[in-house]
Amino acid sequence: MASLSGSADRSLQVARRARAALNRASRRAVMAAAVALGATLLASGAAHAAPAVGQKAPDFVATDTQGKQHRLSDFAGKYVVLEWTNPGCPFVQKHYDSGNMPATQKSAVSRGVVWLSINSTERGSSDFMAPAALASWMKERDSAPTATLMDPDGTIGQAYGARTTPHMYIIDPQGTLVYAGGIDSVPSARKDDIKTATNYVNQALAEAFGGKPISAASTRPYGCSVKYKT
């Protein structure tokens, strides 16, 4: 009986040690998973961190409404304006139907500026327009961008942290972001407000070409939220 009791005790001790070892291994596995998840989240956050004014503008490649590819870095040595757009947005309609955005585009392009209109609306959104339809909409409003780019996956928009339509960015000839914000100073969808607003893009480009620092380099964008893919 004593032999059986001793054997049972030893078996119980072995089982306890095995459970303790398993618990330690499980804790280590959980900690390792947590660390790995944290690293993934940090890396993901860094990958999608929007550039601040004064930082390098992220390079990208996108296809325009005519099927032609454009790479931002191909325009090195020139000022580049990025304009986030969505024809379904009342704020975008305000600036296009009034002629304000096309006039701003023409003024910039006449100075040799590259103007890229970008639509990051996802395909599943009711606001999504196929390339041909978007090109037609822009043409009907006498718009004058260098190209209108399709970004239905939202890759470019998220790289820049574009939040609204419109949301405007200016990149200098060295590839540095020098302006980010709204098209103007009056955040409304009323066309009548345009005449009393300060057009920040016109102002920034005039100051830049005049060799002056941009007085309002970061402003608050306003408009509809970008309809990103979820």
Image: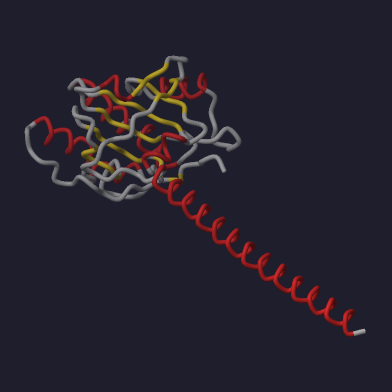
Tell me where residue 73 sits by quadrant: top left
**Which residue occupies the extreme right position in the image?**
1
- Let me know if residue 189 appears in the view: no
Q: Residue at x 7, y 32 (%)?
A: 210
Q: Residue sitting at 11 percent across and 30 percent down? A: 209
Q: Quadrant of residue 125?
A: top right
Q: Is residue 215 left or right of residue 3?
A: left
Residue at the spot x=23%, y=30% of the render?
175
Residue 17, how many percent across, how many down? 70, 71
In the picture shown, does residue 85 fall above or below 16?
above
Specify the quadrant that holds the C terminus: top right
- Image x and y of residue 81, in percent: 28, 31
Q: Is residue 115 left or right of residue 38?
A: left
Question: Which quarter of the rendered picture does the N terminus lie within?
Answer: bottom right
112 or 158: nearer the eye? Answer: 158
Q: Is 49 situated above or below 210?
A: below
The number of discs equals 0
Q: Is residue 90 above or below residue 20?
A: above
Q: Is residue 16 left or right of residue 186?
A: right
Residue drawn at x 19%, y 29% is 174
- Would residue 124 be visible to someone looking at this image? yes
Q: In the rendered view, tell whether residue 206 sits above or below residue 12.
A: above
Which is nearer the eye, 5 or 114?
5
| Place of residue 155 in the rendered image (x, y in percent of width and height, measured from the top left) | 46, 35
Q: Residue furthest bottom?
A: 2
* Outermost residue to the front: 3
Residue 37: x percent and y percent?
53, 53
Looking at the image, what colour scheme do you see?
secondary structure
